[in-house]
Image: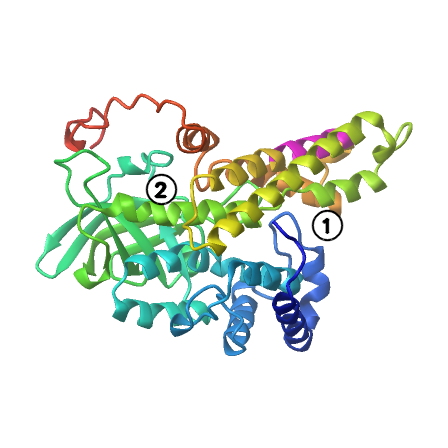
Amino acid sequence: MNFDDTPQEAAFRETARKWVEANGPKELHAELSKSSLGRIRLAHHDIVDVGKAWQKKKFEGNWACLHWPREYGGRGATPIERVIWQQEEGVYGKLTQPFQIGEGMCGPTVMAFGSEDAKRRYLPKLASGEEIWCQLFSEPSAGSDVAGLRTRAEKKGDNWLVNGQKIWTSGAHYSDYGLLIARTDPNVPKHKGLTMFFLDMKSPGVEVRPIKQANGMQEFNEVYFTDVVIPDSQRLGAVGEGWSVSLTTLMNERMSIGARLATGVPEMFEFCSNLMLEDGLAIDDPAVRSKLASWAAKSNGLKYTSYRTISALSKGERPGPENSIGKLVSGMMLQDIATYAMDLQGAAGVLTGSDEETVQGQFQQMLLSSPSMRIAGGTDEILRNIIAERVLGLPGDIRVDKDVPYNKIPTKGR
């Protein structure tokens, strides 16, 4: 793969750079520069409000959802141009956090399986930031095994009646629409009785309960559905084909998570360059340097793996199972780095101060939030199975319930 810009790409980069310089919210640049490790720190601004303002400005300048077709609010850009834009957008790209699920997961699913009317109605408003989307997949009894979900959708004339519960839904508390997978036929094997829908999160019967996290934030939610009515026109794909539809969402999710997930490597280098140990700076310690070298190598490996995906996309191919590699490695590395940073600080690592913008404070937050990164979008165990079976071609895991009707699978509380 050639990493040098072609003349056309260089011209695109120059145009993007000039637009960002002229339109970027410079008053937020300093705070965004200090925001790292996946946490946005804006003292006097709400991330959703400023994110919507930036997304709207990008949309008006034809810089939002670059890879989407123009008729749906995008620019029709190539995968390489999308990467160039992300590089030039720089720290302002952190403002797109509320839209990542919609742009990276929900939007592509609607684009692939929605009606033409649905695509023209919903995608431009998603691209402009006017409407935010969330993903309603995981349940208390169906996290890693999404196909084991219990939320039911029953056909009632031209509508569907939905009852059930979802959990760990990112951004549900500020989302306008959600992508929902539900069970429509319990009499067939669990993967075959699912159907995908999208719904208005303000619909009667939808209740969102934010979850208070260990790090003090509220990013995830429980969502309850009580006799929620969804028109059949908001079904994506055929009835009973929800699992196939969900694979499009999940593949895009793992590519999106792996591409944007902070590894903590730059922050760790900065931290070790300033941390004084008994014998000198941490970065001069051979054991520390060995750790840093290992993480730097893995970080570069992740970068080039993502470039390989970009190369495949540029040829018109869909995101494949190899995206699980980036998500798996980056999640483990994030937690390893946070743990090691806290170990280097010793007793000082458990102290909290008033300034969360210090590197030390960031690693405390990173330690508390990093375990979730090894669960969201597929646990390590699930990803290893995907890599083993679909990338390496190893024998599949034994699945005793594969051909058993869902309502015949022994379980409590069904």
75 sits to left or right of 23? left
Q: Do tag 2 and tag 1 residues touch (Cβ < 8 Å)?
A: no
Image quadrant occupied by the C terminus: top left
Give the mark count: 2
Counting from the top left corner in percent of width and height, residue 46 is at 56, 64
Q: Is residue 122 magenta?
A: no
142 or 247: nearer the eye?
A: 247
| Among numbered discs 2 and 1, the one appearing first in the sequence | 2
Q: What kind of element bears circle 1?
A: loop
45 or 336: nearer the eye?
A: 336
Magenta-colored span: 335-344
Q: Amino acid at mark 2?
A: Ser
> Which residue corresponds to mark 2?
138
Question: Is 338 rendered above or below residue 203?
Answer: above
Q: Amino acid at mark 1?
A: Ser
4 sits to left or right of 75? right
Q: Is residue 337 magenta?
A: yes
> Which residue corresponds to mark 1?
354
